[in-house]
Image (cartoon, rainbow, N blue to C red):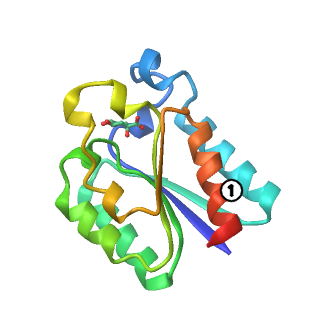
Amino acid sequence: MKVLVLNGPNLGRLGTREPDVYGRTTYADLVELCEATGRELGVEVEVRQTDFEGEMLGWLHGAADEGLPVVLNPAAWTHCSVAVRDACSQLTAPLVEVHISNVHKREEFRRHSYISEVAEGVIAGLGVDGYALAIRHLAATA
Ligand code: DQA
């Protein structure tokens, strides 16, 4: 079994990006956390990040074609991208939406997600632990 962990714009800058909001865990640490969780569960985990929407759409199309479960942090696309949502709608295996910060106690515009309605579940505000929890859930159920 394989789980794809896909990250949207600015998440490659974790560790230095607004550490009071997103913590000091670097993107490299996040990749290691996800891979270690996969190793523990006996599941292959592949982690990717892009600042380009078309690249993300291609990865989601690939996941749809291969029937792969996805952990997605859509980052800013959460709140504005119908295209990312439409690509998520094509997935055949479960999708878990993850946010490092609690988007519900921040600015008003972060409270609406285009993705949540097409996700199996949403984890927000638990820091990078949310990724490990999402992988654990998919490994157990997908
Ligand atoms: C985020 C929350 C989004 O509102 C923001 O645009 C991000 C990161 C999070 O992980 O908390 O880039 O998805």
Of 106 and 44, which appears nearest the observer? 106
Q: Residue at x 59, y 66 (%)?
A: 3
Q: Secondary structure at mark 1?
A: helix
Q: Which residue is mark 1?
A: 136
Is the residue at mark 1 in contact range of ligand 1, meaning its CB lies under 8 Å from it? no
Of 139 and 68, which appears nearest the observer? 139
Image quarter (top left, top right, bottom left or bottom right) of the N terminus: bottom right
Residue 128 in the figure: left or right of residue 89: right
Q: Measuring from the top left, give residue 83's x and y in whole percent.
A: 20, 64
Q: Residue at x 46, y 26 (%)?
A: 22
Residue 107 in the figure: left or right of residue 9: left
Q: Residue furthest bottom?
A: 65
Looking at the picture, does residue 34 appear above or below residue 18?
below
Q: Quadrant of ligand 1?
A: top left
Q: Amino acid at mark 1?
A: Arg
Looking at the picture, does residue 78 appear above or below residue 118?
above
Q: Measuring from the top left, give residue 21's x and y in whole percent.
A: 42, 21
Residue 87 in the figure: left or right of residue 29: left
